[in-house]
Image: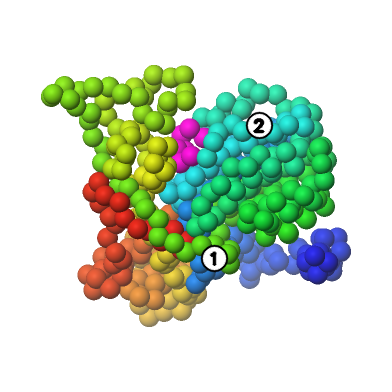
Amino acid sequence: MADNEAANAYTWETEYERTWEVLKEDEEGSLQASVDDIIHRAKRKRLLNQISNVRLGMMRHLFLVVDMSAAMEDQDIKPTRFLCTLKLLEYFIEEYFDHNPISQLGIIVTVNKRAEKITELGGNPRHHIQAVKNLKDKECKGEPSLQNSLELAASTLKHMPGHTSREILVLFASLTTCDPRDIKDTIKLLKQYSIKCSIIGLAADVYICKRVCNETNGKYNVILDDTHYRDLLNIHIAPPPASANTQSSLIRMGFPHHQLLQSSGQEKPAMCMCHLDRNSTVNFSTGGYICPQCKSKYCELPVECKACGLTLVSAPHLARSFHHLFPISAFSELPGQQSTSGQGQRFCYACQTELQDQQTIYRCDKCMEIYCIDCDVFIHETLHSCPGCASTRDNQHQDQGPPPPTGNTTNGIDGSR
C-alpha cells in the first residue's frame, strides 16, 4: 500500500516541468507543427495504451454509481457537474454496449446519505439511457454514502457467475461520505467476491476513494475538465483484464429468432417476460424472441431468461465480441517523407485522401496498405477490421475466424476470454 502511494506521487511533489518547451517554432516561426503533433498523439493515445495478449473478461456486469449530493450542483464544469455527468453517461452507455454486446449494466444513485437502485442489471441500452434522462428532474441534495452504494451493488454482483467480471464504477463529486459502519468491512466484502471498484473524482483526491480502488484492483482518477472527464470514462468501455481467479467454463447460450405467436392461423398477443414487472402495455404484442429452452417470450436481446436462466443473444452480438479475442495489430508509423519518397502521390486506402509529404501515415504490416491518422483510429476503435486485409481473398481465408452460431439452438461458449 505504501509503495503504491509513493510511486503515484502528487503533481506538486514531482520535479518542476517546463511545459511551455513542448511548443517549438518551425523555420517560419509558426507553432502549427507542434500543435498538429500534440493533436496527432492525442488521437493515438488509446491505441498505444492497449495491452496485447491479455485475457479479457468479455461478459461483464457493471454497476454505475452516480453521486447526487449537493456537491454535484457546483458549476466548475458547465453547466453543472450533474448535468455534464448525465450527458456523458448517455454517450458512455451507448459505447459500453457497442463494445460489450453480451454484457449487462445497472445504475445506482446516492443521495441524502442513501443509495437507490435506478435500473437493475440488464442489456437494453435504451432502458438505461431513458433512466439517466429521467434523473434530470431530480434534486441533488445532502451527502452521499459510498458504503451504502458499494454494498447495494455488491448484493447483486456477488450472485453473478464466476466466469463473468464484476465491476463498480463510481462518479464521486463530494469530498465527504456519510457511512453507517466501518467502510473497511465493505472493502473486505468486495475483495471476497472479486468485485473491482473504480472511482472517478469530480473535485479532488480523496484518501478513502483511493484506498478502495487500490485494494480492489480498480482505477482512481480525478478529472481536470469535461474533456478529461470523457477520456476517463472511455477507459472503462473496453473489457478489463480478467482476474487470476476467474473461472474458465463453457456456458449455455440460446440464439432465438424473432417470430410471431400464432394459434390456429391467428396471431395472439402476449406480454413478454421482461415487462411483466412494469405497469406498461407498450410491449404487449404478437411478436418476440422465444427462449429455445422454456419457450418464454422476450422483446429484445441480449437478456438472461428469468424462467430458466439461459443467456439469450443473437449471432451478431456474439460476432461483435470476437474483435476483443482477435484485435487488429497496431499499424506501423511512417514519417511523411519516408513514406512518399520516390513514389509520387499517395492516397489513404480507406478514405482516398491525398497524403501530404510531411504527413505521418500508418501501414498495415499484413496487406501493406497505408492509412491516414483518422482512418487508423476509426479502424482500431470502431471498424475492428482492416479494409485492405478484408478485400484480399488470401487474407480472408487466413484470418477468418469461426462462424457465429445461428438458429434456435444452444451452444457452449467460453465466456472467460
Residue at the location (33% across, 73% down)? Answer: 367
Q: Which mark is residue 116?
A: 2
Examine the rendering and report whether any part of residue 74 can be seen.
no
Residue 350, image x and y in percent? Answer: 35, 60
Residue at the location (47% across, 53% down)? Answer: 59
Q: Which mark is residue 329?
A: none
Residue at the location (31% across, 23% down)? Answer: 270
**Relative depth, front residue between 350 and 26:** 350
Q: Residue furthest right?
A: 13
Residue 125 is one of the magenta-drawn residues: yes
Q: Is residue 262 left or right of residue 362?
A: left
Residue 169, image x and y in percent? Answer: 64, 47
Examine the rendering and report whether any part of residue 332 can be seen.
yes
Residue 347, image x and y in percent? Answer: 36, 65
Tell me the element at label 1.
Answer: loop
Vertical comparison of 209 with 261: above or below? below
Tell me the element at label 2.
Answer: strand
Quadrant assignment for the N terminus: bottom right
Residue 216, image x and y in percent? Answer: 69, 57
**Identity of the amino acid at label 2?**
Glu
**Local crowd at mark 2 within 10 Å, few (<14), some, or many (≥20)?**
some
| Quadrant hosting residue 135 | top right
Q: Which mark is residue 50?
A: 1
Question: Closer to the N terminus: mark 1 or mark 2?
Answer: 1
**Relative depth, front residue between 305 and 129:** 305
Q: Give the range drawn in magenta.
A: 122-128
Disc 1 to disc 2, C-alpha distance: 35 Å
